[in-house]
Amino acid sequence: MPSVAVLVELLRRDTSGGQVKCWEHFAHSAARLPAGSGLDLTVYFLGEREHTEHLAPHVRLVMLRPLLSSAPMRSADSAEDPCDLAPHHPRLAALLPRHDVWHLTHSFAFATTAVRLARGRPEGRRPRLVASVHTDVPLLASVYARYLADRWLPGSHPAVGGFLAEHAERALRRRRDRLLAACEKVLVPTAPARAELARTLGSHRVALLRRGIDHARFRPDPCARAWLTRTHGVPADRPAVLFAGRLDATKGVPLLTESLRLLRERGVAAHLVAAGSGAEAENVRRVLGPDATLLGPVPQDRLARVYAACDIFAFPSRTETSGNVVAEAMASGLAVVLPEGARTTGWLTEPGRDGVLVTSDDPLTWADTLASLLADPARRKAVGARAATVARTAHPTWDRVLREDLLPVWSPQHAAAPPGTAGRPAHR
């Protein structure tokens, strides 16, 4: 097995989002491999200071300071964690040559540095470039552009919002595709995403990288609700509807907030529990008042208890490539409610039995769907119990995903066709 460098150009901290957590899980899985596996893995993150955290003799996490962090440009409205906007990262460039495989996970400083450095090396000394798609940055930027136009321009300007959304998505998709074209293998989380990229890269260059689940951490816990009531004051006499993620428009938070407001107008008892932070936090407080508890960013260990303490997981987002929070909620025994057609529905095996789909992205339809679950405790519990069973039997562990999806791609004997073969017929 080779020396692998995974480039996660996002800030690593206790409350980091799914992409950072994903690679932390894979790193811990790699640390559990037997000493004779031959794999040497380094995962590079952004950090406030440069340092190295050793998980095992053959696995380490390295934090590098950003050159041009997006953090000073961010506000509460930001749709993404801080990244590095510099076109080149000299410190990373100095470290990369020690590795055989360079694995890109984003499209900013780390990725551009790796691709330019690889192209500048002699033919026989070039590393193997692979990539994985974790966030649909172009789609997220499109949704966010519309949101900003609606929020900051006086009056209604759908044409302006549409123009900004279209150009933001097109520019970022071109940037992403240029970087992916340099890679001999690109990993995506779902079959539809694989089919989409296969049209431009060739099916032989695109493979699946599933997401795992920590079944020991995320599981039903009958004692968790009393803990949530005691520690955070969440009422024990009504169902708790959970949202986990950034509290902004890209995740559908305004839609969920309005749907819960409609439920309150109907006299339907429900309490929103929100784990995360973002631009919509104040609006949630203003609209729902005492019917909402905002926990802010929650570390993984405590988040597992929050899941298990709630009854319904409502997640209106359409910008996820996979949505690991859905898998965590299912493993915790919650009835998950998702938009029909969203990529997060890939976690379900029997929609209607192990999760509930909402047919339209409007507050009234979401309110109706939630009301039907809230009014039927037996159905709600049955859906949650079925979700937990599906999670145990159908959702893979992180160790399994590392072994089956990542190691074959990193290993030299599984090398795909070389870069520059996009558009050729797939190998049969």
Image (cartoon, rainbow, N blue to C red):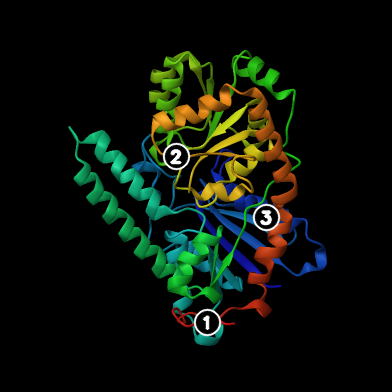
- Residue that mark 1 sits on: 418
Q: Earlier in the sequence, mark 1 or mark 2?
A: 2
Identify the image quadrant of residue 62. bottom right
Residue 206 in percent (x, y) is at 54, 70
- Residue that mark 2 sits on: 251
| Left/right of residue 179 with respect to residue 37 in the rendered view | left
Amino acid type at mark 3: Ala
- Is residue 132 or residue 319 the one in the foreground? 319
Rendered view: 368 above or below 70: above
| Left/right of residue 126 with respect to residue 216 in the rendered view | left
Identify the image quadrant of residue 96. bottom right
Measuring 33% from the left and 49% from the top, which residue is drawn there?
A: 142
Q: Secondary structure at mark 3?
A: helix
1 or 2: mark nearer the eye: 2
2 or 3: mark nearer the eye: 2
Q: Earlier in the sequence, mark 2 or mark 3?
A: 3
Residues packed near mark 1 inside 10 Å, few (<14), some (14 to 19) or many (20 plus): some
Amino acid type at mark 2: Lys
Q: Earlier in the sequence, mark 1 or mark 3?
A: 3
Amino acid type at mark 1: Pro
Residue 27 marker: 3
Rendered view: 19 above or below 89: above
Point out the image quarter for the N terminus.
Answer: bottom right
Estimate the spatial distance between the alpha carbons at disc 1 and disc 3, rounded to whole Å.
Answer: 27 Å
